[in-house]
């Protein structure tokens, strides 16, 4: 059994290495097609190496029996996001191939709805897979916001940076890490970000229309985060108040049997 488990773990790690190899192959194809400059190559390679390293470490900690079909779809999306990242970095040196950038982004966004369905149908849903999917989504939004900010202004970076600001805030305020209830509104707003940024990045609409689309995305995102933070704050306070008597009772030594009985009743 030990040999079998080791063999499966090796296969799981091999799949991440294959993903990194496919990422480099995609960069080579993009470089040949558009003559990608040093910035695009460096950023693309950095993305491939970072993705491989972080995913390999996460898999080593989780030790899944197999990589899973849903994670393969998400890895495919990550490879596409790596291509988009390289193209956006290259756009600072030369005119970006908008059609190619839009095409890769569109496929990545479409596949966003596939990996979850595959996980549910195959019974392979895992916390690691959900986190992997979320991180790929968040990074794609960040990259798209960087690209669109060159057209509409640096304020667009608020869209891509909001999730990372929330994670940073949770370091100082642990109550922000509490699980949130299921919400279709939250999922809809999250899906809107990529679509709106893609539409603005494609530059098919007039400037005013692109501005309105991105402002709509930002406004809905602020509303969604604000609603979640408010819910977490409201539920964190009762939990803290309920835990206070138990903490006090555990720290203080009762002076008598009668006081001990009173403290036990308070804790209950």
Image: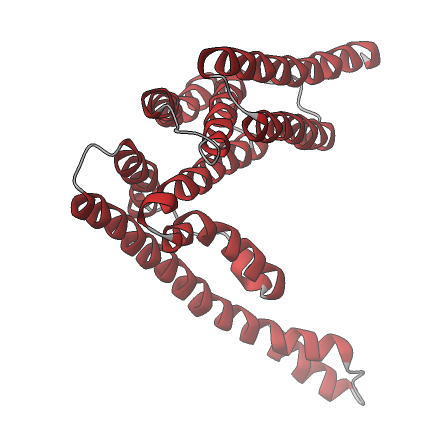
228 relative position to 22: left or right: left
User: Residue 66: image x %, image y %?
Assistant: 63, 16
Q: Is residue 112 above or below residue 267?
A: above
Q: Quadrant of the N terminus?
A: top right
User: Residue 200: image x %, image y %?
Assistant: 27, 38
> Which of 205 and 240 lies nearest the eye of the viewer?
205
Q: Is residue 136 above or below residue 18?
A: below
Please report the residue visible at 45 percent of the width from the left and 53 percent of the height from the top: 162
> Which of 89 and 156 lies nearest the eye of the viewer?
89
61 relative position to 22: left or right: right
Q: Is residue 264 above or below residue 182?
A: below
> Which of 112 and 210 lies nearest the eye of the viewer?
210
In the rendered view, how is the structure colored?
A: secondary structure
Please report the residue visible at 30 percent of the width from the left and 45 percent of the height from the top: 189
Number of marks drawn: 0
- Residue 253's quadrant in the figure? bottom right
Q: Quadrant of the C terminus?
A: bottom right
Can the viewer see residue 178 in this picture?
A: no
Q: Is residue 262 above or below residue 90?
A: below
Please report the residue visible at 58 percent of the width from the left and 12 percent of the height from the top: 22
Please report the residue visible at 39 percent of the width from the left and 29 percent of the height from the top: 95
In this view, which residue lies farthest toward the front? 94
User: Residue 218: image x %, image y %?
Assistant: 31, 53
User: Residue 267: image x %, image y %?
Assistant: 62, 74
Can the viewer see residue 227 in this picture?
A: yes
> Which of 265 and 79 lies nearest the eye of the viewer?
79
In this view, which residue lies farthest toward the right? 2
């Amino acid at each position: 059994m030990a040999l079998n488990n080791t063999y499966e773990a090796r296969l799981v790690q091999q799949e991440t290495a294959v993903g990194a190899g496919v990422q480099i192959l995609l960069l080579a194809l993009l470089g040949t097609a558009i003559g990608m400059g040093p910035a695009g190559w460096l950023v693309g390679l950095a993305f491939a190496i970072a993705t491989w390293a972080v995913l390999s470490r996460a898999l080593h900690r989780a030790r899944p029996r197999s990589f899973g079909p849903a994670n393969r779809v998400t890895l495919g999306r990550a490879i596409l996001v790596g291509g988009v990242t390289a193209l956006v970095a290259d756009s600072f040196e030369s005119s970006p191939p908008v059609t190619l950038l839009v095409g890769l982004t569109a496929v990545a966004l479409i596949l966003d709805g596939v990996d979850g369905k595959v996980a549910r149908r195959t019974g392979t849903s895992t916390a690691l897979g959900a986190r992997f999917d979320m991180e790929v989504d968040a990074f794609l939004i960040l990259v798209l916001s960087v690209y669109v900010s060159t057209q509409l202004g640096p304020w667009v970076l608020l869209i891509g940076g909001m999730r990372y600001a929330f994670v940073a805030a949770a370091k100082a305020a642990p109550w922000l890490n509490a699980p949130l209830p299921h919400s279709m509104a939250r999922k809809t707003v999250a899906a809107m970000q990529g679509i709106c940024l893609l539409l603005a990045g494609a530059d098919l609409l007039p400037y005013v229309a692109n501005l309105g689309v991105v402002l709509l995305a930002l406004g809905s995102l602020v509303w969604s985060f604000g609603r979640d933070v408010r819910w977490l704050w409201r539920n964190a306070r009762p939990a803290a108040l309920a835990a206070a008597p138990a903490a006090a009772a555990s720290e203080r030594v009762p002076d008598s049997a009668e006081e001990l009985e009173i403290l036990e009743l308070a804790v209950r």
